[in-house]
Amino acid sequence: MVVVLVLVLIALGSVAFHLLSPWWWTPIASNWSYIDSTIIITFWITGFVFVAVVCFVAYCVFRFRHKPGNKAAYQPENKKLEWWLAGGTALGVAAMLTPGLVVWKQFVTVPPDAGEIEVVGQQWQWNYRLPGADGALGRADNRAVTPDNPLGIIAGDPAGLDDIIISGGDLHLLLGKSVRVHLRSLDVLHDFYVPEFRAKMDMIPGSVTYFWFTPTRTGTFEVLCAELCGVGHPQMRGAVVVDDAEAYKGWLQQQQTFQQLMASVVPAS
């Protein structure tokens, strides 16, 4: 009976912890409430299965507990039960995957009015590139990376000359402005993750991945690398600052463009 009571208390305690936890009411800094809804659906499905299994085990412990004279019955197979288990599992997995597919489509379908930024990961720091006055990012290639051109921007592309370069500093974003985030790695696998934005994506060497989001409140939010990338992985941190229009404009005016960066390393003739 002690085992039965412990199992029932585990099931009830898990449900109570889920319902009473204050973590669910943490305000978010982006538009991805869809992701929270998907996580909640997943928790309800897996939570139902967890409670059902634990309660079933508790029932079995109680129902088939040892009694003098009882003998265990050997049943090698039960096709009806196997079909029920396989069918129920398939329905449960489908119920969890379907909302995820809907959210994924929204996650990679960028609004036409969204701006652009680029996040470049390397062991073990974050670098960023923002479009300049022309509103467009210039071309870049990892093969063009040099000590003087750490992000590999193609110097012959006019669109890249006014790109704003942020190496190892904080990324600032404009409140309420949707942005498409281009993700590039210079060395190994990284993952750009801002927990409050409910958004993350792997950065794969040789490829450019992307996602988009809309900052919905001002503040400073920590950037983490969510992919083990070497001994310095725990220290690969940064910050995203969401500003109002005035603060963002002031910060933007203080940043260095790619053209200014190249002029500082190559003396003018």
Image (cartoon, rainbow, N blue to C red):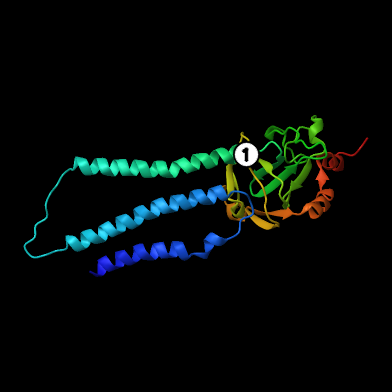
184 left or right of 73? right
Closer-to-camera residue (187/93) = 93
Q: Identify the residue shown where x is 26% and y is 58%.
A: 57
Q: Farthest residue in the top direction?
A: 156
What is the number of callouts on the image? Answer: 1
Specify the quadrant of the image occupied by residue 213. Answer: top right
Q: Identify the residue shown where x is 52% and y is 65%.
A: 22
Q: Quadrant of the C terminus?
A: top right
x%, y% of residue 203?
60, 41
Q: Amino acid at mark 1?
A: Tyr
Q: Farthest residue in the left direction?
A: 69
Specify the quadrant of the image occupied by residue 204. Answer: top right
- Tell me if residue 178 comes above or below residue 251 in the rendering: above
Q: Secondary structure at mark 1?
A: strand
x%, y% of residue 137?
75, 36
Closer-to-camera residue (206/54) = 54
Closer-to-camera residue (204/171) = 171
77 left or right of 55? left
- Tell me if residue 203 comes above or below residue 198 in the rendering: above
Q: Local crowd at mark 1 within 10 Å, few (<14), some, or many (≥20)?
A: some
User: Which residue is label 1 attached to?
Assistant: 210
Q: Farthest residue in the bottom direction?
A: 2
x%, y% of residue 165?
77, 44
- Tell me if residue 113 comes above or below residue 219 in the rendering: above
247 left or right of 128? right
8 left or right of 221? left
Q: Identify the residue shown where x is 59% and y is 38%.
A: 108
x%, y% of residue 50?
35, 55
Q: Identify the residue shown where x is 80% and y is 33%.
A: 159
Residue 204 in view here: no
Q: Quadrant of the N terminus?
A: bottom left
